[in-house]
Image (cartoon, rainbow, N blue to C red):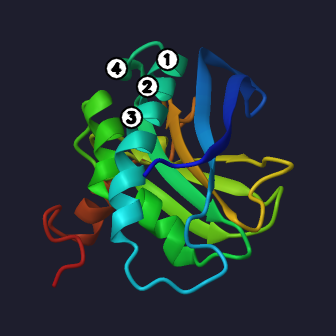
Amino acid sequence: MQPDIRKIVTYDEEVLIEGFRPAATPWRMFAVACVVRNPWAGRYVEDLKPEIQAYGPVLGKLMSQRMIELAGGGAAIEAYGKAAVVGLDGEVEHASGLIHTLRFGNFYREAVEARSYLSFTNTRGPANAPIMVPLMDKNDAGRRSHYLTIQFAIPDAPRADEIVVVLGGATGGRPHHRIGDRYQDLKDLGHDVDNPAAV
């Protein structure tokens, strides 16, 4: 059982000036999207596991390799995330199923030697729906400079019976980051970093 991939789309953005001020280093955000036929479209399927286990490794390996090539190496990726958009004949559960499996995400996590979980979105929409890929620092979830969102769309995807599966990355945080990190907030509030909700 193999995923039926109709097309692969690459997004690459390089920012030279942000906030009316040149970036000291060009800031890149990029993504790889696979447009895949939804094997569960148009019907209710109780057990999604066979397709998840079959599709996850294929997509994870292929897309992670593409991301590493885009970045010029895993070490160049500082922030990362994932997303999926299911077409109108599918459930959000279908989008979730393809990206929320270690058989998919671990390829990317290992390729960039990350410790953080992959931030994510899973949504439903028609062709040309906004694709939002939230990013965070691959090793430090509290590093706010790397809270980013890649936004793009594919004019002909997802079709009603498709899912767009996406990996995203960035070579750094916002060029002129100046809002601090969550650790200072915790300190100011008298909360423990290991118990941020103070419960």
Graded by Cα atoms within 10 Å as few (under 14), some (14 to 19) or many (20 or more), the crowding at tag 1 reads few
Q: Position of residue 10 (x, y in %)?
A: 67, 31
The residues bearing labels 3 and 2 have C-alpha atoms spaced at a distance of: 6 Å
Q: Earlier in the sequence, mark 4 or mark 2?
A: 2
Q: On the image, which quarter does residue 60 sit in?
A: top left
Q: Position of residue 39 (x, y in %)?
A: 56, 65
Q: Earlier in the sequence, mark 1 or mark 4?
A: 1
Q: Position of residue 185 (x, y in %)?
A: 33, 61
Disc 3 vs disc 4: which is toward the camera? 3
Residue 75: assigned label: 4
Q: Amino acid at mark 4?
A: Ala
Residue at which label 1 appears = 69
Residue at which label 2 appears = 65
Graded by Cα atoms within 10 Å as few (under 14), some (14 to 19) or many (20 or more), the crowding at tag 4 reads few
Image: 174 above or below 159? above
The residues bearing labels 1 and 2 have C-alpha atoms spaced at a distance of: 6 Å
Residues tagged 1 and 2 counted as in contact (Cβ below 8 A) = yes
Residue 61: assigned label: 3
- Judged from the image, the secondary structure of the residue bearing numbered disc 1 is helix
The reply to whether residue 141 is visible in this rendering is no
Disc 4 vs disc 2: which is toward the camera? 2
Residues 160 and 10: in front is 160
Graded by Cα atoms within 10 Å as few (under 14), some (14 to 19) or many (20 or more), the crowding at tag 2 reads some
Q: On the image, which quarter does residue 16 sit in?
A: top right
